Image (spheres, rainbow, N blue to C red):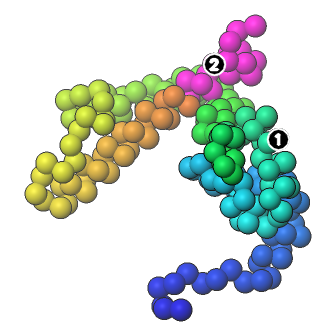
Amino acid sequence: MTEFDPAPESDAAQRRWQEGTDTFGRVYDVALGVTSPTAYTEIAELADCSPNAAKKHLERLTEMGIVRADRDSRPAQYERNDGYLEWQEASQIADELSIDEIIDRVAALEEQLTEYEEQFGTTDPTAVSVVEHDDHEMVHERMTAISEWQGIIREIRLYELARQLSQNDGHLIPA
């Protein structure tokens, strides 16, 4: 092992994970970390369980909307459902903040959004080229600004969703 290789996980740490979490919990944890379609057999290996157990739990997570399944691929592949995670995050915001606090936060975020739109002369951060400068520092600054800009757009979406949830007693659509 070279000095740059990551330290292997100790057997004790692996046993603690196994002892402290049931199979469903391990599959859930692994599934939340999967950002691209991944075979259930690979998820089983990462969750330290049998492929049959992983597939059973992944099907349950699919029914719950936590993961998405591509059953046409062989073997079946699964990935986390980012929409579910966004809804969960918005629900947490709705639980923690009042509607007025949410509205104030959106107003502050919209001010920041307007600043970025004026700075770059567009409403679309993907339309901005970050490499049109020869100066490495300028490229880095533009990349950072665009990343922050995209984060603000995401936050506005989350807080708007949280506002809807708060105003409609936890539902997206008024009853």
- Circle 1: is it few (<14), some (14-19), or many (20+) Cα within 10 Å? some
- Amino acid residing under circle 2: Gln
Report which quarter residue 115 is drawn in: top left
Q: Is residue 103 above or below residue 95?
A: above
Left or right, 36 with respect to 45, comes to left
Marks 1 and 2, the one that precedes in the sequence: 1
Q: Nearer the viewer, residue 37 or 172?
A: 37
Left or right, 84 with respect to 143, comes to right
Q: Nearer the viewer, residue 146 or 41?
A: 41
Q: Which mark is in front, 1 or 2?
A: 1
State the residue position of label 1: 60
Q: Nearer the viewer, residue 169 or 33?
A: 33
Residue 16 forms part of the magenta stretch: no
Q: Which residues are magenta?
A: 159-175
Q: Is residue 160 among the parts visible in the rendering? A: yes
Residue 47 is situated, as x and y percent measured from the top left of the image, at 76, 63
- Circle 2: is it few (<14), some (14-19), or many (20+) Cα within 10 Å? many
Quadrant of the image for the C terminus?
Answer: top right
Q: Is residue 93 among the parts visible in the rendering? A: no
